[in-house]
Image (spheres, rainbow, N blue to C red):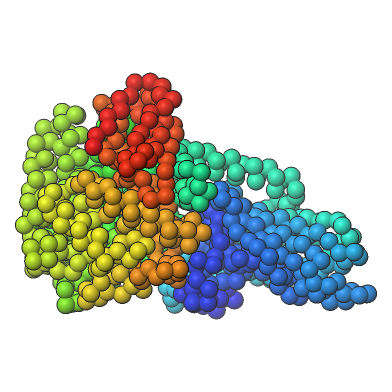
Amino acid sequence: MDDGYSVQQTAAESAESGGLDTLQALKDGDTFLVADNWGDLKGGADGLFDRDTRILSRFVMTVGLARPSRLSSGVSRDNVFFTAHTTNRPLPPMGGRSAPAGVLHIERRRFVWDRRLFERVRMVNHGIEDVLLPLAFEFGADFADIFQVRGTLRKKRGAGEVPTTDGRRVTFRYTGLDAVVRTSCLAFSEPPARLNGSRAEFMFSLPMGKELDLYIECGPEMCLTPDAQRWRENAVQARLAMRRRRRRGASLRGPRSPRFNAWLDQSRSDIALLTTDLPTGPYPYAGTPWFSTPFGRDGIISAWQMLWLDPSLAKGVLTYLAARQATEVSPFQDSQPGKIMHETRGGEMSALGEVPFGLYYGGVDTTCLFVALAGAWFRRTGDLETIRALWPNLVAATEWMRDYGDSNGDGLIDYARAAETGLSNQGWKDSEDSIFHSDGRFPKGPIALLEVQGYAFAAWRAMADLGALLGDARAPAWNQQAEEVRLLVEDRFWMEDEQFYAIALDGDGNPCEAIGSNAGHLMFTGLPSAARAAAVTKRLLGAEFRSGWGLRTLAKGQARFNPMSYHNGSVWPHDTSLGVAGMARYGERDAVGMILGEIYAAASHFQMRLPELFCGFEREPGEGPIAYPVACLPQAWAAGSVFLMLQASLGVSIDALTKTVTIDAPTLPAGIERLTVSRLQVGDAVLDLAFERLGDQVVVMPRNRVGEVRIVTTR
């Protein structure tokens, strides 16, 4: 249906013309904004999105019929404000001499709060004459679904109405095929000289040395008239809310190194930006722009990365996912009773079933990770009452693992999508070409992924431990199940000639003998024997995996290796962090600090904000890592990577039941001489830990201890 609301450019086309790394993102709750470096929205990947619908698709500012010259722009370190500093090009004559270039400073400053974009355009005349300033905005609202923006074609869509205006407001209205009426309202503090459904024109008289502000708001509902007071009051609320999220849990500070601390601050701010406070508690959304929604796997891993510092995230994730646990069989949703959600969406296409992601369960690993995280969270907090509340969900999850997750009864968790609309690969490497045999052939299903068996092992062990505490008679059987999984993995996945684990087993039980980073996840769960973990570590640290910027997802020389691929040779910071934590679990420390240093170097080239992934090319002297063009930025588990790697490097583990903090052979990356963990809570106790390099060792000094907590150091 041609309704005049066509999507102007696909996200893929937008990426080719600039890349997502050129977009500036703001977020609050289920509303987020992505714009270019001028602050403009021009279609493609950019726009103001609310609940997976783009409610403002075009918003371009011109000064004297031309785009202003950009001086600088960026998002504040706390992720609340975007600011673009621009100046004018020569202005057209307005009854006298034209104003020369560079006499006006035009600042666009904006934030997102309470489902609304707030913007202030501040104009300052630094010239020696008064200026007539023609300012204009082009705008539009296409109400495109997030999947449509990503490139999914629709044969037809709903009806858009002609925008209405009332002097200083424009209201857009769209009725979807789901019969839901979606609206957005764009309002200005000053009435434009000309206003229609796609353009607002202003003519400001700006005396020399004076400044003038224009306030703008846009949201899904009718907006009040913007003004300075509304802007200030809402800005204060936005900043306070972000500050509360950033200050949850313990904090980390490095040496007097502004760059390292900037990385820590940026990563913590990105976690805070992506975390939405839901009725069930805080939940880290996966990333902007494509994944600003609760994802099961991403939320669990992000919460696990932050667990030692801020266990509240894990509680929020567990509670939210428990409330959405599947109760029925649905091939379209890839759901069975007990399975944990992979993804949820709120847009028109999901509501209509054009895509299955309204509430989608096509992740083979999420259910196991859910149970394993519950066990890790309990060890960190000792909160047995919450575990009691979650117990029916945890038991249901293990029943899914037993009855549905193991489709062929061989004791291993496997997957095969139930409908053609679902994901063909359902582990974290979910692109179509990510699982293959050593010769590049794609395997037949059902497929049993290596790392998922590790997650299952951790889940069964967690259930055994928790069950014993709760007096559940099934605890010994769950412990036996964990041991059976361990033996199966060691027997069927290990490749003696490669001294490595196969990436998967195919539907005939044959190993897919590709060499991938999945084995690092297996070590993270503690499944491998010490000897095999040492062999895997040695290979992960070799040149085939190490790019100099972290660990590649696939070893060089493998059939489908491509450093520019999504999963077959790129570097994902979260993947590297899990591999590093796996190495540390088996006693490796020096390499952990070394790879942490490599990821730190990569972050330095990405303005201290790690993207979802980057290319896996070899590190070259004097050159930075090569960006992947459509990587999400920021991404929660990329931001969380530094915290998991630091935990691994410092050798910190926390047992709330025994009120013990164990520090095993701590190390620090090269160039970092000291690190302080502040406000670390263990049960009712709080303390600081100061790590410092003395000679060839790193020592720890507890400080400001309040309450009962024991420190155990080992070497």
Percent x, y of residue 58: 62, 69
Q: Nearer the viewer, residue 685 or 364?
A: 685
In this view, 60 is above or below 596? below
In this view, 523 is above or below 277? below
Q: Residue placed at 89% from the left, 60% from the top?
A: 208
- The image quarter containing residue 124 is bottom right
- The image quarter containing residue 565 is bottom left
Percent x, y of residue 462: 20, 40
Quarter of the figure with the C terminus: top left
Residue found at the far top of this picture: 707
Answer whether residue 42 is visible to the viewer in this image. Answer: yes
Answer whether residue 303 is visible to the viewer in this image. Answer: no
Q: Is residue 173 left or right of residue 178?
A: right
Q: Residue placed at 20% from the left, 72% from the top?
A: 436
Percent x, y of residue 697: 32, 40
In this view, 290 is above or below 559? above
Q: Nearer the viewer, residue 199 or 208?
A: 208
- The image quarter containing residue 154 is bottom left
Q: Residue placed at 33% from the left, 54% from the top?
A: 594
